[in-house]
Image: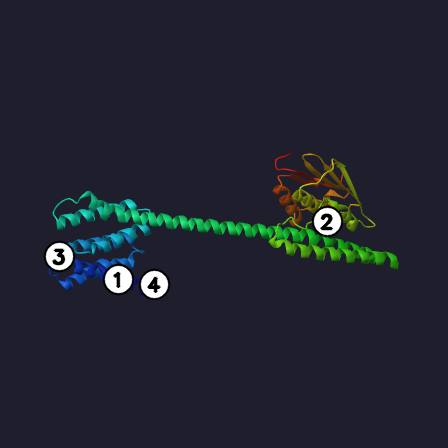
Amino acid sequence: MHWPKEVLLVAGAATAAALLTALEAQAPIDVPLLVVFSAGVSLPLLVRRMLPLTAAVTSALIALAGMAQLHRWEGMLVTMAVFCTAVYHRPRRPGLVLAISTCWVVGISMVVGGAVPALTDMVLMAVAPVATGYALRLHRDRADQTLRLQRAEAERVLAEERTWLARNVHDSVGHHLTAIRLQAAAARRTRGDIPATRALETISDLSLSALTEVRDLLRTLSEHPAALQPGTADLERLAGQLTSAGRTITMRRSGTEGVLPPAVDHTAYRVVQEALTNVVRHSTATEVTVHLRQNDRGLRIEVLDNGAPAQAAQAEGQGIRGMRERVRLLDGTLSVGPVETGGWRVRADLPRERNAW
């Protein structure tokens, strides 16, 4: 608690009550008594946060005693302020505070005039402070809720950006590193200068492609995620990079032709890229077929290899989870698993528009 500020608040309230009473007095006033009661009715403000109901009751009793001695005293304004703070700091008990303030107003009227208070006095002195405190608390709660929602939204956006960044780094850089490792292994196994030179040229091209994609990724962090990203037109080049002496990758296209939406085009590339990268990393397949079937509703992707399912049937890693997330964002479907005839298959259906399938 900031005690200097609290002490200044109590001193200011007591001074205001005493000065207002002295300025409006039409008869001599007992100044020491005025000072004592003004200070006493203001002291409960010190505990208004920790003990709001206790502060309200204490201030009300002191105000009753002060009115009995001074008859005309503005310390009632301080008590009304304490009632307001009591509801503000104890919003679940407004009815109790209202009952206390009502009894206090009735007591003041009986002490001063010996009669039941008028309706206007009841509204101004009993109801208004409670209603004001409750309204202020509701406003604060709404502001806090709005702030929490804004923070939650900011955290959600940040989490999505991190996921997007991790997915793109995994898909682009991870793929190129896998292809570079594949070509380097092929260069070690080959004999002669010409095959080694070709492998080194491929490694150089892959390194340049990886560097270009990283630069594009960094450049697009503040732009639209789909900008400057590869699409289905680049799949033949991708298949060529991953083709080796012991593994053949065949591309097939069928169905209607036409320009795919950018999000569908890019997602299709990433799905095929991840599927082929997994084949290179984890499968013994020697033949891989990538089939793209396009129609008016969307695009079907099927990547089928002849590897051993037992070796490929592993727990889903970051790559497959990334594929599922990309396909899910487009309201598509993805299936990954072995086939009865042997081998491993990745199939994805990507609609042109949401709910098109």
Q: Quadrant of residue 334?
A: top right
Q: Nearer the viewer, mark 4 or mark 1?
A: 1
What distance separates the C-alpha of mark 2 from that of mark 3? 91 Å
What distance separates the C-alpha of mark 4 from that of mark 2? 62 Å
Disc 1 marks which amino acid?
Answer: Gly
Disc 4 marks which amino acid?
Answer: His
Mark on residue 2?
Answer: 4
> Residue 170 at x, y = what percent?
67, 52
Contact, mark 2 vs mark 1 (Cβ under 8 Å): no
Q: Secondary structure at mark 3?
A: helix
Question: Which is more N-terminal, label 2 or label 4?
Answer: 4
**Nearer to the camera, 189 or 67:** 67
Question: Which is more N-terminal, label 3 or label 2?
Answer: 3
For the question of whether residue 42 can be seen, the reply is yes
Residue matched to label 3? 69
What is the basis of the colouring in this image?
A: rainbow
For the question of whether residue 58 can be seen, the reply is no
What distance separates the C-alpha of mark 2 from that of mark 1? 75 Å
